[in-house]
């Protein structure tokens, strides 16, 4: 469980850094490269989260010589459980419950939005028309099979030129991949439901998405700015959330969209600079998030790599520790000579300190391992030996014989 919690914390930190950076840079990027440049910056967030979740690589641990008694393994498990706070056991189930609750809430919002549209009537060119005038229409609904849904009064509300621009706006959402992007944003919202920065960041992400789509429409029809602005003003103001879809934003966002229509469209050079800057920033943030991860161990604690032992008697259990019922652990680093004998012993760690080290070192000096040959030539090597002392009957008898 600890590994899962550490992974979640690393991903949360990467999300925080990337999200804060994008929030700080989106307005300067919009001024430099246009609305599309600001929207592209949001790719840094999922890239950073993914990079923080990928394994950095493996580091080969020292070979480990497993000890001998059954109580050894029980002692290790008991010691690990004793040092782990009880509240940590509830963190992962609590996070999972939040993920499921967030997913259920979004599924309900999507279902409520779709139900409010009522039966849809198929029209030409893959369009659908609702029987009522939902405030969020026109909109693109769905993910695997996106549908452009129009209000019942679409022909009466908009002129022919306005209808053409509105439909092109919705089709651009589908062609540009905005629906999968919104699905990914919904996934992040579920996984990081506890993050205080994420709701505000996702609102600005959706806003930048609409601004980028507006800019793409105006770039194709530079002389239709006024017509496009009038079409925006005729749209009603939605309040219903739509996790998997794109609809017209509320009033405060609509004002900024109309203001941006006055600006000149981004040049091809600006669009190229925006794409390159977003790519460099995403790679940089992802690289830093990945590099910050420690290398994964090839073997976890308890997954011992056996080293053949020719002679390995167990250490004596100190009499005072046995009488007091004290358990502990000692980790030794052994330098093995070419013939398998122990040339040097180093205490890597011991808990509790000053109780079991002497007995462990005394026993280790007597151990003998089978020589490790490479192409027929014996070689010197170093191994790690974890030893657990558990005050069971066998250990007590051993200590009482001293």
Image (cartoon, rainbow, N blue to C red):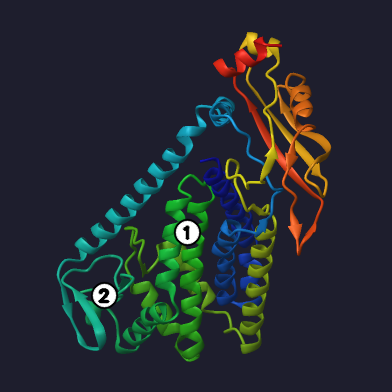
The quarter of the picture where residue 122 lies is bottom left
Residue 202: x percent and y percent?
A: 48, 59
Label 1: element kind: helix
Which numbered disc covers residue 149? 2
Residue 392 visible in the picture? no
Residue at 69% across / 48% down in the picture? 63
The answer to whether residue 11 shows anywhere in this view is: yes
* Residue 51 percent coordinates (x, y): 60, 61
Q: Locate residue 189, reporting x and y percent.
A: 45, 54
Q: In the depicted view, which residue is nearer to us: 275 or 266?
A: 275
Residue in the foreground of this view, choosing between 330 and 201: 330
Q: Residue at x 64, y 54 (%)?
A: 17
Q: Quadrant of residue 137?
A: bottom left
User: Horizontal placement of 83 versus 366: left or right?
Assistant: left
Answer with mark 1 or mark 2, whichever residue precedes in sequence.
2
Residue that label 1 marks: 203
User: As displayed, is residue 264 above or below residue 327?
Assistant: below
Label pair 1/2, CB-CB below 8 angstroms: no
Q: Nearer the viewer, residue 288 or 40?
A: 288
Residue 394 against residue 74 in the figure, above or below: above
Q: Is residue 321 above or below residue 22?
A: above
């Amino acid at each position: 469980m600890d590994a899962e919690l550490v992974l979640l914390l690393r991903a949360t930190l990467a999300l925080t850094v990337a999200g804060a950076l994008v929030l700080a840079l989106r307005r300067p990027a919009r001024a430099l490269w246009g609305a599309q440049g600001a929207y592209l910056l949001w790719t840094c967030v999922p890239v950073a989260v993914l990079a923080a979740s990928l394994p950095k690589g493996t580091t080969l641990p020292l070979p480990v010589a497993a000890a001998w008694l059954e109580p050894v393994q029980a002692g290790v498990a008991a010691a690990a459980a004793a040092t782990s706070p009880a509240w940590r056991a509830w963190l992962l189930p609590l996070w999972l419950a939040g993920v499921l609750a967030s997913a259920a809430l979004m599924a309900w919002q999507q279902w409520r939005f779709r139900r409010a549209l009522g039966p849809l009537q198929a029209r030409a060119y893959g369009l659908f028309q609702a029987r009522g005038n939902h405030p969020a229409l026109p909109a693109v609904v769905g993910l695997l099979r996106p549908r452009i849904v129009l209000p019942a009064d679409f022909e009466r509300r908009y002129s022919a030129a306005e209808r053409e621009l509105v439909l092109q706006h919705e089709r651009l959402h589908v062609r540009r991949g905005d629906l999968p992007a919104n699905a990914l944003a919904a996934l992040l919202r579920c996984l990081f439901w506890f993050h205080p920065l994420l709701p505000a960041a996702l609102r600005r992400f959706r806003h930048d998405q609409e601004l980028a789509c507006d800019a793409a429409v105006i770039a194709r029809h530079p002389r239709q700015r006024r017509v496009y602005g009038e079409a925006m003003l005729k749209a009603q103001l939605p309040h219903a959330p739509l996790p998997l879809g794109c609809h017209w934003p509320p009033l405060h966002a609509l004002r900024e969209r109309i203001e941006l229509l006055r600006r000149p469209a981004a040049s091809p050079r600006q669009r190229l600079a925006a794409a390159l800057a977003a790519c460099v920033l995403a790679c940089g943030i992802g690289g830093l998030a990945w590099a910050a991860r420690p290398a994964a161990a090839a073997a976890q604690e308890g997954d011992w790599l056996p080293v053949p032992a020719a002679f390995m008697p167990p250490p004596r259990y100190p009499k005072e520790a046995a009488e007091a019922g004290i358990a502990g652990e000692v980790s030794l680093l052994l330098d093995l000579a070419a013939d398998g004998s122990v040339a040097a012993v180093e205490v890597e760690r011991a808990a509790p300190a000053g109780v079991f080290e002497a007995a462990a070192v005394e026993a280790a000096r007597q151990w003998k391992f089978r020589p490790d040959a490479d192409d027929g030539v014996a070689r010197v090597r170093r191994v790690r030996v974890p030893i657990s002392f558990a005050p069971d009957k066998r250990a007590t008898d051993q200590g009482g014989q001293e």
